[in-house]
Image (tube, rainbow, N blue to C red):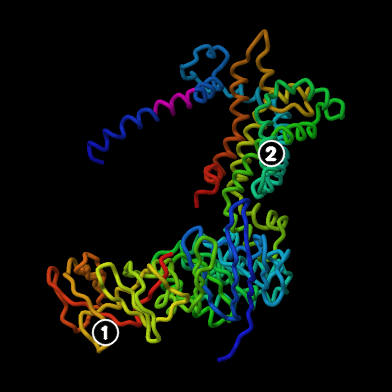
Amino acid sequence: MNTAAARRTALPFSILVVAAVIFAAPLVVALLTSLKSPSEITRVIALPNELYFQNYAIAYDRMGRSFLNSIAITVPSVILSLLVGAISGYPLAYMRGAGGRAVYFFLLTGMIVPFQIVQIPLFFLIRSIGLYDSIPGMWLVHTAYSVPFCTFFMRNFFASVPRSMYEAALIDGCTPAGYFWRLLLPASGSGLAALAIIQSRAIWNDLLFAITLTTSDKATPVTATIAGFASSLQVEYGPLMAATLISLLPVMVTYLLFQKAFVRGLLGGAGK
Amino acid sequence: MTIRPPVIEITAAQKMFGSFQALSDINLSIEQGEIVTLLGPSGCGKTTLMRLLAGFETVTAGTIRIDGRDCAGQPPERRPVNMVFQRYALFPHLDVFENVAFGLKVKGTPKTEIRERVQRMLHIVQLDSFANRYINELSGGQSQRVALARALVNGPKVLLLDEPLAALDLKIRQHMLVEMKRIHAETGATFVYVTHDQDEAMILSDRVVLMEKGRIVQVDRPETMYAVPKSLFAAKFLGETNLFEAAMASDDASGMTAVTGSGLRLRSSIVPAGELRGKVIVSIRPESFRFNRDNDTTQSATGKVEDVIFIGSRSFYTICLADGVRVRVQVQRGTRTSLPKPGERTEIFWDSDNVVILPQS
């Protein structure tokens, strides 16, 4: 690289390094804190004198069941929300005329309703149908609440698939439903993967639904348990950070596994 | 000459999109086994006409009959047609074999028959060894062959091709045109080909359907359409031509004569499609001019060579005539006649059977 080129890239490179440090700092602090003994915990920036893994033991002991609950809530909720989003996005991507557009915009309004508005009515609704403090109740709520976004995402992804593929299938004798199941859905792996990552992250990290609609060990997800590490009298920083890091792992692993598909999906299938 | 039955009959077809008239008064008959090209500039309605044949659009008025059956209300899969799309429209998650086999699978064809038919079709398009490749592992030309195989394996009476070579580069396009002629000869299907590329139309077609603003302006064999365009649009759209503004002077049994403003008499022995009166346009192709006199019937004019452009196999001379009108003369490389140099005065010659007199609009 010549000097002029090096000078040109120096500024953007420096900005990116600073941004990376800013983004990585909380994670590094969390990692350091999780490895410190209670006596060291107030020295935020310093390295631990010795690695104190007891925090992880405490965290795992208290969140073990809720970790499984989170998996039991997240996996089916993601699958269901993807399925509903794809099924409802398909006709909206292929439908011509004002009717389709009206339905689409109506669905989009769902994305701008904050959860806090529906929190109390939802609590009564879920309790009245007998799904309060249950994992199926959480599936239902997460799936329903993600319909607008998943529809929006999949509708836009499907709209980026050339219409000629649909027409080629029709002229070959395929029905619109057959096209969806046999061709469009299998060919939309990158879009589905991207949405799966977005949804996994959102559902796994949800706290508001969790504290509103669950109360006991049989359904409480990990986020609600982690919130319990901080009470009004005491914050157990070491176990709290350890629990937070443990809870991050599944989402990070999912992202690392599917990051290529994630980027392709966000580009609407534009990549090869 | 054997008379083949028409496989497509379009009668007084119209297509409206809202208040926009995309097609009007389309009448066309296509014989079994023909290669017919729908040619015209963007927005002329050629793709709309093809989509009407495919069943993706319905006619606003008029009728379309394919293989003797009225297609009104018939969905694409019920018509004896298949289609090759501009961007191939291949299924990216399936390999070549599965792509070609898809239509047969949908129809519930027995597995052994599917295998036989797909292998035969892959052999025809010369992709036998590519059966297990995925679409993203193929070149543009290979993808186009898969698209052809996928459409033809279903045994359509009519194959619709919507600018199938538009995404390919020139060399591959030329090769694919030859391939397409061979595949057509092997399958015997009727090909309806949409393009805005006149060269493709000329190379491939038995007949060319020239369209402008939603109407058919001329249907002819390529050589006839090129030599005897019936309108100014046809003369200008197909190849290059010299156009002279003139007025009709005489019309007798041996031909017609038009005279330009400067008094240049242009005689044509070609019988026009309709009656010509008053102001007209005279079209003479660049290759119709020569620098030597051939016989007694030759017409001529004198001018000065302004410019010579050499483009490999041929050269273009710009000759400025006495009245300031510029004429392009094409000379094939290897012509033995002595050729004038830029700045020299020269005489150019042409024959009356290369002169086409056209109405002004």
Quarter where residue B82 is shown: bottom right
Q: Is residue B18 left or right of residue B40?
A: right
- Say which amino acid is labelled 1: Thr
Q: Which residue lies at the image location 25% right of the left edge and 76% below the top edge?
A: B331
The vertical placement of A212 against B302, above or below, is above
Q: Main secondary structure of the magenta part?
A: helix
Residue B278: give x, y in percent of width and height.
Answer: 39, 69
- On the picture, is B231 further left or further right than A265? left
Say if residue A129 shows up in the picture: yes
The numbered disc on residue A102 is 2
Chain to which mark 2 belongs: A
Q: Classify B16 as above or below A148.
A: below
The residue wearing badge 1 is: B298
Q: Position of residue A35 (x, y in %)?
A: 54, 22
For the C terminus of chain B, the image quarter is bottom left
Q: Residue at x 50, y 77 (%)?
A: B207
Which residue ends up furthest to the bottom in the rendered image? Answer: B1
- SS for dot 2: helix
Provide the residue span drawn in magenta: A17-25
Q: Is residue B282 left or right of residue A113?
A: left
The extreme left residue here reads: B344
